[in-house]
Amino acid sequence: MPGKVEGRCAVDASGMNTAEVGTSATRTRTVTDRDIALFTEISGDRNPLHYDEELAAASRFGGLVVQGGVTSGLLNALVAEQLPGPGSVFLEVSWRFLAPVRPGDVITAHATVTSVRTDKPITTLATRVTNQGGTTVLDGTAVVWRDPVVAAATGAQHHQQDDAGQSGVTTRRESA
């Protein structure tokens, strides 16, 4: 499922284009067992809730769950690739994990610009991740800084790459 960006851009004090309040983006991915294994390799998180089907089934979750970092990682990709885009890093996040994500779930990250600093390339986003049934599995906010040098070097037409064929992303900006 493709990702998208909708909204308007303005020029901030640094001279670069920044998203205006109300601009939004989405990014979708199907979560796999491989995602769990790769996250374990990176983080060392070997919680039985991610691997032991019998034990996970007996838990309050009723089955295997994906690490929270896999779920929130989709927001990392959205911020770095789409909104605000290349050169963006999180300064602050506040996320609540509201429901489990399971292998095979199709999750969609959503971000909407709620405020933009005019003196610095800093944007505040309302963020959430939903599953294929529309259930919100993660909800919160993020404050993002976008490096003007990287943003200028990558230009307005940043080309996203497919991440191993698991998510297709098409970025579209619309002026209202």
Image: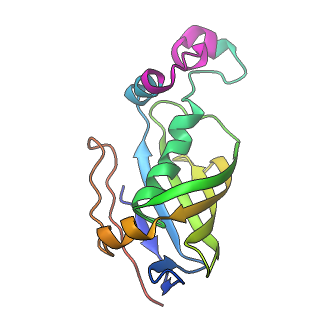
Left or right: 165 in relation to 12: left
Q: Is residue 124 left or right of residue 51?
A: right
Residue 55 in the magenta stretch? The answer is yes
- 82 is higher (above) or lower (below) than 139: below
Depth check: give the residue in front, 62 or 80: 80
Which residue is depicted at the point 70% across and 42% down? 98
Q: Which residues are magenta?
A: 40-56
- Secondary structure that dominates the magenta span: helix
The part of the image, by quadrant, that contains residue 33 is top left
Q: Quadrant of residue 50?
A: top right
The residue nearer to you, when weighing 157 against 136, is 157
The percent coordinates of residue 131 (x first, y second) are: 55, 46
The residue sitting at the bottom extreme is 176
Q: Quadrant of the N terminus?
A: bottom left
Image coordinates for residue 23, horizontal then vertical, percent? 54, 76
How far from the left and from the top, in percent, is residue 121? 55, 72
Q: What residue lies at 55% left-to-right and 20% top-to-bottom?
A: 45
Left or right side of 154 for 94 = right
Locate residue 46, reporting x and y percent. Answer: 54, 15
Residue 49, placed above or below residue 21: above
Color encoding of the figure: rainbow
* Vertical placement of residue 151 versus 164, above or below: below
The residue positioned 59% from the left and 74% from the top of the image is 120
In the rendered image, residue 44 lying in the magenta stretch gets the answer yes
Identity of the residue drawn at 41% across and 67% down: 4
